[in-house]
Image: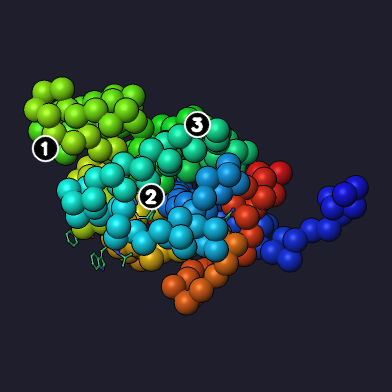
Amino acid sequence: NKWSKLCLPEYAPKIVTLSTWLKNSTHTTVLTGAGMSTESNIPDFRSKEGWWNNIDPRTVATTDALRNNYDLFHEFYSMRINGLRECTPHKGHEILADWEHKGHIQAIATQNVDGFHYAAGNENVYELHGSIHKFRCENCAKSAEEEDFLSKSNCKYCGGKLRPGVVLFGEMLPEGSWSESLSHFRKSDLVIVIGTSLEVYPASQLPQMTNGKTVYINVEVNAHNHNFDLIIEGKAGEVMKLVDE
Ligand code: BV8
């Protein structure tokens, strides 16, 4: 409504603090989770409307599911891939890209597989849980096309099953993304954590790997988060728009 601009959110004073820290920092690293993309209409995992509220992750997002329950595995990831077609990065993603270009932030470590940080124009992105836009054979590891996966074809080299390039539960994170992220966190004087429940190891450990200031932006705050220097309880995109003003 026409008055909404006049109503500043409760966290408004904290925006000033974050803006000041951002301006004065020399190395800022951002960690994002699924909450970064819900304003693009992509469901997260552990909220009320999240994937894991309706589906047990062990039945779809594990190597066991890939090997022993391929039909369900395939159905789940096809649904995710098709759903993504309708979605695009939002203003918050664009602001992060702008901040990288202006030198305000140095890197983004993301648990998201949607590729939206790249799509918005960030370059220094570490995809800790891989990408849902890349495909390979689970047997011979040769790469494949999205259409091959969606049509449930087998690998054209060895006949193996195809899979998206995401990190399933029980799998190691991509070595390079992990070690580079770690080194960014270690040298940061500011870390901004956006839209993640911090329930998934080892990404959950990254915010503790810095001696710098730490900020947590999330619509809900729980026991995992009390160690942060600044906690802003709000929507990622809305908070970032205010910081950017
Ligand atoms: C590993 C990718 C070594 C695919 C995902 C017991 C048995 C087996 C394993 C384990 C175990 N205990 C611990 C483990 C290790 C396990 C783990 O941590 N499990 C937890 C859950 C207990 N981790 C692993 O297996 C990792 N690998 O450890 O390797 C190893 C090797 C062999 C054996 C053992 C260990 C690999 C983890 C990768 C898992 N892959 N997905 C896919 O996308 O399908 S996990 C899944 O969670 C998501 O993909 C996502 O990437 C990840 C993190 O979730 P979040 O991003 O934080 O999302 P979530 O919904 O939780 O939170 C969103 C938040 O945002 C909420 O708080 C919400 O309120 C908020 N929000 C919403 N909207 C907004 C918002 N905030 C702000 N603004 C908004 N608009």
Separation of residues labelled 2 and 3 (CA atoms): 19 Å
Q: Return the x and y of residue 161 as percentages of the image width and height.
A: 18, 36
Amino acid tagged 1: Asn
Q: Residue 138, relative to residue 18: is it above or below?
A: above
Which numbered mark, 2 or 3, is in the foreground of this view?
3
* Labels 1 and 3: the sequence-earlier one: 3
**Residue drawn at x 43%, y 41% as measured from the top left:** 80
**Residue at figure coordinates x 46%, y 60% from the top left:** 54
Q: Residue at x 47, y 63 (%)?
A: 53
Looking at the rendering, the quadrant in which ligand 1 lies is bottom left
- What amino acid type is highlighted by mark number 2? Gln
The amino acid pointed to by label 3 is Arg
The mark nearer the N terminus, 1 or 2, is 2
Mark 2, Cα crowd under 10 Å, few <14 / some 14-19 / many 20+, is: many
Local packing at callout 1 (Cα closer than 10 Å; few below 14, some 14-19, many 20+) is: some
Q: Is residue 100 left or right of residue 142?
A: right
Instruction: Identify the residue under disc 3.
Output: 85
Mark whose residue sits in front, 1 or 2? 1
**Is residue 173 at least partly visible in the picture?**
no
* Rendered image: mark on residue 139: 1
Query: In the displayed image of the protein, which residue is found farthest to the front?
Result: 71
Residue 107 screen position, x and y as percent: 40, 43
Please tell me the numbered disc located at residue 111. 2
Q: Position of residue 242 (x, y in %)?
A: 69, 49
Q: Is residue 220 left or right of residue 167?
A: right
Would you call the spot at circle 3 few (<14 residues within 10 Å), some (14-19), or many (20 or more)?
few
The relative height of residue 227 versus residue 40 in the rendered view (above or below) is below
Q: Which mark is residue 93?
A: none
Q: Nearer the viewer, residue 194 or 155?
A: 155
